[in-house]
Image: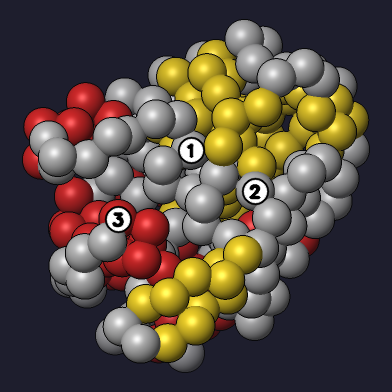
Amino acid sequence: MNLLSINVGLPRTVEWRGKTIYTSIFKAPVSGRIRVTMLNLEGDRQSDLSVHGGPEKAVYAYPGEHYAFWREKLPEMELSWGAFGENFTTEGMLESAVCIGDRFRVGSAEFVVTQPRMPCFKLGIRFGRADMVKRFLHSGCTGFYLAVLQEGEVAVGESLELISRIEPAVTVAEVVNLYAADAANQDLLRRASELSALPKDWREYFRKRLWEPDA
């Protein structure tokens, strides 16, 4: 598991459908050793803290393997690392293999996987197409957020070492499927609702979908 690219960006204003939007969706690769803090990376900042950022969404990671899929689906787009607003473009960390609560070390920093990414309309702004959010969610290529457990420094090319995993494990992909439709899988819903690494609002949402929530 490797770090292919580190991408950062500061908030900017853009015009979208006659409105001025404040967004940090535009990220660009950076080189050298980058400082990681509890809330973001050096040179990066979230724009709307009501839905982005905070300790549970300090860093957004996106599998670089998905770029081949998107280049096929969006041949007119120039897709360089950071195109999806990710801070870390990774290799070897697909949603079907990464689990909520997984702890990773890269460089001198440590992280924990907290949740999948549920995109807002600003992804559509980044790609200049209103259907992008729907396509992104249906693709299953969501990426995932990381909380910072230990501040430090990271650099492109460093490996991501899995330190620990919660058992029984629930993958990022399983959480996405539960969110989308899979209410019949009550055992998985219960396990997801009890994941301490998953943010409270996610756990409450899954608990409400249990058939016998008080049993």
Say which quarter of the image contains residue 96. top left
- Does residue 21 appear in the picture of this structure? yes
Around disc 2, counting alpha carbons within 10 Å, would you say few (fewer than 14), some (14 to 19), or many (20 or more)? Answer: many
Marks 3 and 2 sit apart, C-alpha to C-alpha, by 16 Å
Q: What element carries label 3?
A: helix
Q: Which label belongs to residue 18?
A: none
* Residue at which label 1 appears: 82
Around disc 3, counting alpha carbons within 10 Å, would you say few (fewer than 14), some (14 to 19), or many (20 or more)? Answer: some
Q: Image point 65% across, 48% down: which residue? A: 9
The kind of residue tagged 2 is Gly
Residue 206: image x %, image y %? 41, 76
In this rendering, position of residue 126 left or right of residue 136: right
Q: Which label belongs to residue 127?
A: 3
Q: What element carries label 1?
A: loop
Observer-nearest of 14 and 188: 14
How did the renderer colour the structure? secondary structure
Q: In this view, does 191 lie above or below 61?
A: below
Residue 42: image x %, image y %? 82, 41
Q: Image point 80% across, 55% down: which residue? A: 39
The kind of residue tagged 3 is Phe
Observer-nearest of 151 and 112: 151
The kind of residue tagged 1 is Gly
